[in-house]
Amino acid sequence: MNLTSLRYFVAVVEAGSMREAAEGLHVAQSALSRQIQNLEQAFGAPLLSRLPRGIAPTMAGRVLLRHARDTLSAVAMAHDEIAALQGLRRGEIRIATIDPLAEDILPGLITRFQARHADISFDVRVGNTRQVQGLVREGLAEIGIGYNPPPDPDLAVLTAVDQPLTAFVAPDHPLAAHAAIALEALEGCRLILPPARSPTRRLIDEAMRRQGVTTRVAVESDSVALRLNTAARTQAVALLAELSGRTAVAQGRLAGVPIADPAVENGSIQIFALKARQRSRAVTAFLRGLQMAIRHAR
């Protein structure tokens, strides 16, 4: 039994699926299964129950889950405290983020930070908002960045910046000529949306329902790049945060049309971290720059 096994076990329980956990951890599903089997052999009891719609911990698994989370949290805190002793000379900054930040803001921030602190390394994981939350809960990331993350009692929101939804369309799309549109303008349009039951999708579906707009789904995916590239090649409309398509708009591949409707104006990009977690000086210094960059990204 080792820390990797515990991290993998927690990830499977959080995801409720071996496949989703493997994708979130960026490991092969077979490797993940072997780690779980090793844990079950070490404890002499089944830890997971296979259900028709996923995986859930057994009674023994719930006991291990509680202690595994405590152990991973304690190890991560020790890592942070030791890094703090090194000041800004050495250390690692672990970040989990959604795609748009990985493409647009983080590369420049990391480059400028390392120009001043060359021995600080970065571990950056990319996923959807739920995966980002899981990585922070598991102690695999100290800072998480997500769009419309659902409330989590284990996480503290450090920064929240409004990012209302924007309609991204090909430059020759009829909507591209508008300065802004209401939700009603999307009636009859083929839409490119995030996956069903995701936080942003729930925001969109609820807003459409309230306004009586019929949703016609052309494509749904958790890949921001796929959604934007599909919009650029078709007459379908991709609904994302403004920041997500900023680069494509600047390159002339897409037009971004704000949706002027209160029902979708409460979206936000949030930076979050585990509550009561001591952060190293390096993480604190980088966090200040990250918060400033996101605030100015509006």
Image (cartoon, rainbow, N blue to C red):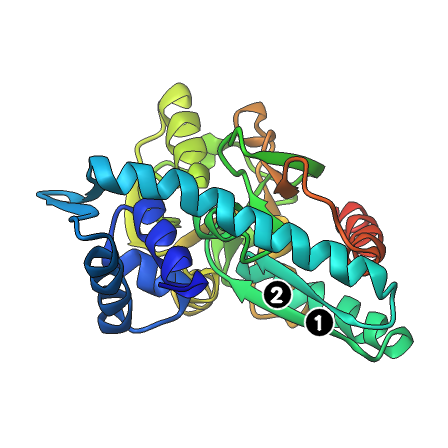
Mark 2 nearby-residue class (10 Å; few <14, some 14–19, many ≥20): some
**Residue at point 31% right, 46% down?**
13
Q: Please say if the residues under marks 2 and 1 sit with CB atoms less than 8 Å apart.
A: yes
User: Mark 2 belongs to which amino acid?
Assistant: Ala
Q: Nearer the viewer, residue 25 or 263?
A: 25
Quarter holding residue 163: top right
Sequence-wise, the earlier of marks 2 and 1 is: 2
Farthest left residue in view: 52
Residue 70, horizontal then vertical, whole percent: 50, 42
Residue 235, horizontal then vertical, whole percent: 39, 59
Which label was assigned to residue 107? 1
Quarter holding residue 36: bottom left
Q: Secondary structure at mark 2?
A: helix
Residue 172 as seen in the image, left or right of residue 194: right
Which part of the image, by quadrant, shows the N terminus?
Answer: bottom left
CA distance for labels 2 and 1:
7 Å
Task: Please give the residue where the numbered disc 2 appears in the rendered image.
Answer: 102
**Residue at point 61% right, 50% down?**
145
Residue 268, horizontal then vertical, whole percent: 62, 38
Residue 254, horizontal then vertical, whole percent: 56, 63
Quarter holding residue 197: top left
Residue 15 as seen in the image, left or right of residue 175: left
**Residue at point 58% right, 54% down?**
75
**Residue at point 43% right, 35% down?**
204
Mark 1 nearby-residue class (10 Å; few <14, some 14–19, many ≥20): few
